[in-house]
């Protein structure tokens, strides 16, 4: 007893093969789940902060910078979590000796869901030693804890 009909001619077999091949291709193209062009991890990093400013003030060293608004690939930045500030102290006896940057502080961004977002951010460093040269860099931090490239470097001498 035969349930399926037997395909006798070669033309029918080829037609069925082509139909199945096209169906497989269609399923693989339609079902990929992609909602747009793929992005490289480097393209999904925030633009680098280029306007970090530092100056000595009454309360400490005032750092200011502009909020990045785009990723490196030009798309609008929508998952900015904050900024990480790094500092290094230059030796008074050897200002050219290599000294590593160390994390000094983090500044959180609290306005992700607001219509009007802050354009300027800042931090006042109050943990300072007199007559010391400090260098700073700021990194943007995304919600997934990834960091941007470092900002421009600023140098400030603390003379209270």
Image (cartoon, grey):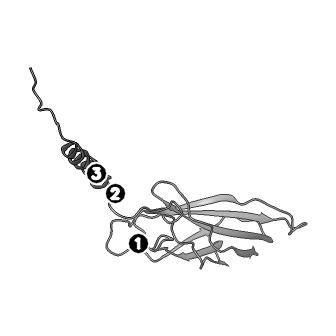
Q: Are marks 3 and 2 in contact (CB under 8 Å)?
A: no
Residue 31, disc: 3
Toward which corner of the image does residue 89 lie, by quadrant? Answer: bottom right
Q: How many marks?
A: 3
Mark 3 vs mark 1, foreground winner is 3
Residue closer to the observer: 160 or 132: 132
**Dot 1: what SS?**
loop
Tag 3 near tag 1, CB within 8 Å: no
Mark 3–mark 1 Cα distance, whole angstroms, equals 27 Å
- Residue 158: x and y in percent read 74, 73
Q: Quadrant of the C terminus?
A: bottom right
Q: Which residue is mark 1?
A: 76
- According to the image, label 2 marks what residue? 34
Pinpoint residue 102: horizontal percent, then vertical percent: 69, 57
| Separation of residues labelled 3 and 2 (CA atoms) | 8 Å
Looking at the image, tell me whether mark 1 or mark 2 is earlier in sequence order: 2
* In this picture, residue 123 sits left or right of residue 112: right
Q: Which residue occupies 21% across, 45% down?
A: 16
């Amino acid at each position: 007893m035969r349930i399926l009909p037997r395909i006798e001619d070669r033309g029918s077999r080829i037609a069925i093969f082509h139909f199945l091949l096209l169906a497989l291709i269609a399923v693989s193209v339609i079902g990929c789940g992609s909602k747009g062009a793929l992005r490289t991890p480097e393209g999904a990093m925030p633009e680098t902060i280029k306007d970090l400013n530092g100056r000595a003030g009454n309360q400490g060293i005032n750092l200011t910078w502009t909020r990045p608004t785009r990723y490196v690939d030009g798309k609008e930045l929508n998952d900015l979590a904050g900024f990480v500030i790094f500092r290094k102290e230059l030796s008074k006896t050897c200002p050219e000796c290599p000294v590593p940057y160390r994390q000094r502080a983090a500044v959180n961004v609290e306005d992700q869901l607001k219509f009007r977002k802050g354009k300027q951010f800042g931090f006042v460093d109050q943990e300072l030693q007199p007559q010391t040269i400090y260098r700073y860099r700021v990194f943007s931090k995304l919600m997934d804890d990834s960091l941007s490239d470092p900002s421009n470097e600023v140098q400030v001498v603390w003379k209270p």
